[in-house]
């Protein structure tokens, strides 16, 4: 799997958009960008994934640059419950039983 | 999303005893499951890949005779920590892969907090 680089920690004011960046400059053409988060003492939760187009679901939006070397996860209106560690992972998702390898992630603190 | 259930959520055991942790995919079949270990303030570390009907594949540095993995059905994988010692105290998390039209998605259990005393 390609490696990813994320900031160690970020703060975000409650109600504002949280923009979490991720660099994946060595991503391969068949690798997807996945985002998970882990709230303290719980298992990770899937958020969103994408290949090259921007994606949106009920939880977040994923913006992938045209060269696919970086992406941004956007939580449009952060709440206190969004405080968690966010992991950006690249892996071959389609028809693959590829491992899910976690890096250090970004610890997001949503502040009242 | 799909549901993965781990049992127990927490366990305390005496040093030298064995502990079994179960991981179940509740609403889908999973030929592949993963087991992770997480120490405080650290990320998840992959221990092994569990494949239904075959032997597990262990990551480098993980003792296969200490961490026994059995994946006997498409909905159940178990991790047994044998002869547990205090240094095995950790948060153990399982994950199951579900096949979907857009690829495979990984869903995670809620974790098992193991404390060895």
Image (cartoon, coloured by chain):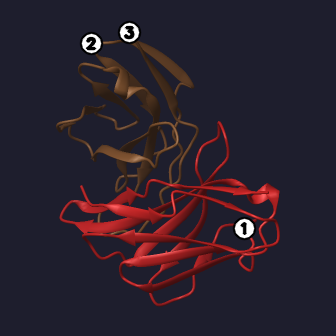
* Residue A95 horizontal side relative to residue B20, left or right: left
Q: Which dot marks residue B62?
A: 1
Q: Are marks 2 and 1 on the same chain?
A: no
Q: Which residue is mark 3?
A: A112
Colour chain A is painted in: brown
Foreground of the two, A80 or A102: A80
Foreground of the two, A11 or A49: A11
Looking at the rendering, in which quadrant would you find the N terminus of chain B? bottom left
Disc 2 and disc 1 in contact, CB within 8 angstroms = no
Q: Position of residue B76 (x, y in %)?
A: 42, 78
* Residue B61 horizontal side relative to residue B109, left or right: right
Q: Position of residue B33 (x, y in %)?
A: 45, 70
In the depicted structure, whether residue A68 falls above or below residue B116? above
Q: Residue at x 31, y 20 (%)?
A: A79
The mark closer to the camera, 2 or 3, is 3
Q: Residue at x 65, y 36 (%)?
A: B41
Q: Tell me the chain of label 1.
A: B
The residues bearing labels 2 and 1 have C-alpha atoms spaced at a distance of 43 Å
Q: Give the chain ID for the red colour.
A: B
Q: Which residue is mark 2?
A: A15
């Amino acid at each position: 799997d390609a490696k990813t680089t994320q900031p160690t920690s970020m703060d975000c004011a409650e109600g504002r958009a949280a923009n979490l960046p991720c660099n994946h400059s060595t991503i391969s053409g068949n690798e997807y960008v996945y985002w998970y988060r882990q709230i303290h003492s719980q298992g990770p939760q899937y958020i969103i994934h994408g290949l090259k187009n921007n994606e949106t679901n009920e939880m977040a939006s994923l913006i992938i640059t045209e060269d696919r070397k970086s992406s941004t996860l956007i939580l449009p209106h952060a709440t206190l419950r969004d405080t968690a560690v966010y992991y950006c992972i690249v892996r071959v998702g389609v028809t693959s039983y590829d491992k899910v390898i976690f890096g250090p992630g970004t610890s997001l603190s949503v502040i009242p | 999303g799909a549901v993965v259930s781990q049992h127990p959520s927490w366990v305390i055991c005496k040093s030298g005893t064995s502990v079994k942790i179960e991981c179940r995919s509740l609403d889908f079949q999973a030929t592949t499951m993963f087991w992770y270990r997480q120490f405080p303030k650290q990320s998840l570390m992959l221990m092994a890949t569990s494949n239904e009907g075959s032997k597990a594949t262990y990551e480098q540095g993980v003792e296969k005779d200490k961490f026994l993995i059995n994946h006997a059905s498409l909905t159940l994988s178990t991790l047994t920590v044998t002869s547990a010692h205090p240094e095995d105290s950790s948060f153990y998390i399982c994950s199951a892969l579900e096949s979907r039209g857009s690829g495979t998605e990984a869903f995670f259990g809620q974790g098992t907090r193991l404390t060895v005393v």
